[in-house]
Amino acid sequence: MTASVSAWTSPAAIEVESRLFRALAVLRVVVLINALGLTVYRAANFDPPAAALVCALVMVGWTVFALWAYADPHRRTAVLVGADLAIALGLLLVTPLVKGPGFQASVPGFWVSGALLACAIHYRWIGGLLAGVALAAVDLGLRQEIDQSIYGNAFLLLIGGPVVGYMCESVQRMALERDEAERAAARAEERARLARAVHDGVLQVLALVQRRGGELGGDAAELGRLAGEQERELRALIRGEQPGRGPAAGMGDLAAALAELETGTVTVSGPATAVEMPAHQAEEIVAATRAALDNVRRHVGEDARAWVLLQAFPDHVEVSVRDDGPGIAEGRVVEAGAQGRLGISESIRGRIEDLGGQAELITGATGTEWELTVPRTGVDA
């Protein structure tokens, strides 16, 4: 996700910034107490001594104002952050004037970290870097001698600002991504709810109209044909609106694979959502279903109607393939097997039994129906 300028003003980003400023408020109080204690301890180094009181009042006044100003996101403007940094730099610049050019410790000391971190939080790593460079450059530029301790403090300013700014940016980015993921999940849940409602209502009615229209014939048959076309288009639309997550590696979507078998004479019905199964299982079930449909076309006729129904359960799936033909004559299946015609025994039963399932054939004067039941393995129910 690439954050834009507007993204940093989103509620999630502002909330992250507010929490960091609340933590900074605690740090400001701590470093203020430290600075006041050192000012009192080193009061003799100030010339005149009253300068120590003036500097202390400036730090106290600005700290109190900053705690109030940074508490409201609307007050966190470039003017406020710039003034914060300017006062910190100003206290550094007056140090030689009130303590002499050979001073050992600056007036604000670690108090300047408040302004540094405010720049880093509000303007992220770039703001932290620029503030660190400015504070370190002024501090080092005022020194007559630079020892290891002074260099170490300046180095901490240089790296502390960018690090805190980068961390702030990372946390804001994660908050934005989290909110986007939650919104996507909510949209997906709403789409799934609507898909279930459509599937349980409109699609079933259209399928019923299509079936009854074909049975009644005449104008009703045309109405059934139109209902079938609308059902296919609506089902495709619902399937296209499902979340973009595809099956995991080695898995397949049985519902989508069976839907590809739908034609003008074949109606496929199933869950509105994906039915994940191991890819090999899904392929074998589709092959067995295709073989059953081939039998319908071969033995009932090219224009024969057929219906495929997929039902998914946590531990197994059931696929029903039904036609409106005259059924299979008694003993015909046994006779076909004896003649070496293995379409039923191998293409359908053999495939399903190899998967650990069972294939049941139901036939009569009203048509033929296959009930294919296969356990779901490797699926988190």
Image: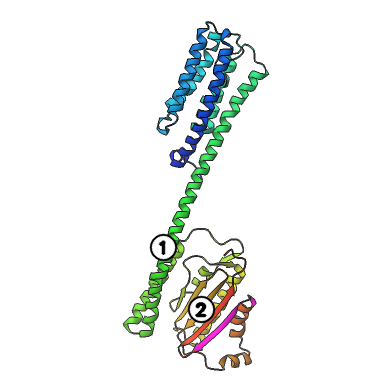
- Quarter assignment of residue 246: bottom right
Residue furthest top as drawn: 48
Q: Position of residue 365 (x, y in %)?
A: 46, 91
Residue 320, label in figure? 2
Label 1 residue SS: helix
The magenta segment = 354-363
Label 2 residue SS: strand
Q: Position of residue 312 (x, y in %)?
A: 52, 70
Given residues 376 and 28, the one toward you in this image is 28
Main SS of the magenta segment? strand
Residue 194, label in figure? 1
Q: Position of residue 305 (x, y in %)?
A: 44, 82
Residue 288, label in figure? none
Colouring used for the render: rainbow
Q: Residues within 10 Å of mark 1 (few under 14, many from 20)?
A: some
Queried whether the magenta region covers residue 311, the answer comes back as no
Q: Residue at x 44, y 41 (%)?
A: 11
Q: Residues within 10 Å of mark 2 (few under 14, many from 20)?
A: many
Quadrant containing the C terminus is bottom right
